[in-house]
Amino acid sequence: MNNTEAPTDPKAMILLMGLRRCGKSSICKVVFHNMQPLDTLYLESTSNPSLEHFSTLIDLAVMELPGQLNYFEPSYDSERLFKSVGALVYVIDSQDEYLSAITNLAMIMEYAYKVNPSINIEVLIHKVDGLNEDFKVDAQREIMQRTGEELLELGLDGVQVSFYLTSIFDHSIYEAFSRIVQKLIPEISYLENMLDNLIQHSKIEKAFLFDINSKIYVSTDSNPVDIQTYEVCAEFVDVSIDLFDLYKNSNQVQKGNENGNLQLNDSKKVIKHPEELKNVSQLGNDVILYLRQMIRGLALVSIIRPNGTDMESCLTVADYNVDIFKKGLEKIWASSKIPKNEQI
Ligand SMILES: Nc1nc2c(ncn2[C@@H]2O[C@H](COP(=O)(O)OP(=O)(O)OP(=O)(O)O)[C@@H](O)[C@H]2O)c(=O)[nH]1
């Protein structure tokens, strides 16, 4: 959807800004439209603001403002726009000369904070795939330091700014967006508590609540996120969807076993109920990957470490506890502060 108007409905809105060619459209296409990163090489420069809506646990709107637009000229209703925004995501191309980006960011932060003091300011130090480790650290330090100095000069030294090192060529961009989106979910602390409860009682080492389409995780338990664990879980979402689609088609000619489950091999099965996707896979090191579809396009993906317990017992306990978790999620959603345009 293309639109120059800010939405008037109370969606959680993310504003994506940055100088020309910093990578805004690529980020949108890769994260929200599953575009292959290499295909972004041929993206045309965006000349009009574009607005896209995504329904995950929250209804999210992402507005991309092209780099060459002057948002502060009188004809552009910046005030209304910035007031309706939950997060300002500013993209800085780390492979380019970034001092002018920081000056531009400072001007935008000053304005954004004035009209909307509760706005989250998030800075993506982007395209870090092209930098070696030393350059990466240097760029991060310099950008953070200079941004801090600009804020100090503007008398905004108390304003919280978060920085993320990102690239569309790995999972860092999904991880950054996950954290940005989570800050916009009012019920995030309940979700985290529920996930903590779930893992404590199920031999689960780590659990993510994924948005299946974008592979952003809208919540996780309170243990630290290790990017490799996230990658494994995100890829398991992809594999599960592919298998689901595959068996959806082949199911017409091939029957499952007597339980209606499709056996892949002893340790791996995709279980299809008409309305629920489930996938379980045991890896060579005994770790079990476990995926269950939840509500509103979400899936719970967890890593189970059996530590000597047999797989069947682990799965029975996990199934039982995940059922309870899902019911809790339905309850939270039913009494959520989030506006509901869609049913579960
Ligand atoms: N190496 C690298 N290149 C990237 C990354 N993200 C985007 N790019 C490239 O950067 C170039 C510009 O990307 P765009 O997404 O068109 O940039 P934009 O900010 O939308 O540009 P405007 O529409 O002109 O404002 C493209 O060639 C992308 O392939 C990244 O993470 N790493």
Image (tube, grey):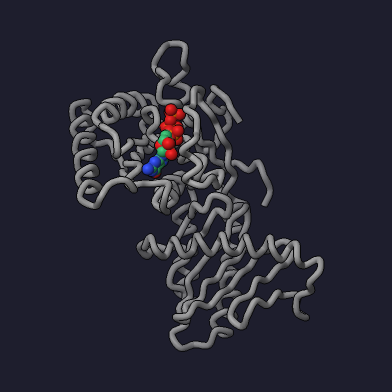
Which of the 4 image quarters holds residue 171?
bottom left
* Ligand 1 sits in quadrant: top left
Which of the 4 image quarters holds residue 66?
top left
Which residue is found at the position 57% from the left and 25% from the top?
3
Viewer can see residue 331: yes
Judged left or right of residue 55, residue 247 is right
Task: Pick out the residue farthest to the right.
Answer: 253
**Is 277 located above or below residue 74 in the figure?**
below
Which residue is found at the position 27% from the left and 30% from the top?
102
Which residue is found at the position 54% from the left and 22% from the top?
4
**Is 82 located above or below residue 282 in the figure?**
above
Residue placed most toward the observer, 167 or 87:
167
Task: Pick out the residue farthest to the top.
Answer: 74
Judged left or right of residue 22, residue 194 is right
Judged left or right of residue 254, residue 23 is left
Position of residue 200 measured from the top left corner of the image (x, y, whole percent): 45, 74
Q: How many marks?
A: 0
Position of residue 74 measured from the top left corner of the image (x, y, whole percent): 43, 11
Position of residue 182 measured from the top left corner of the image (x, y, whole percent): 45, 49
Which residue is found at the position 58% from the left and 80% from the top?
267
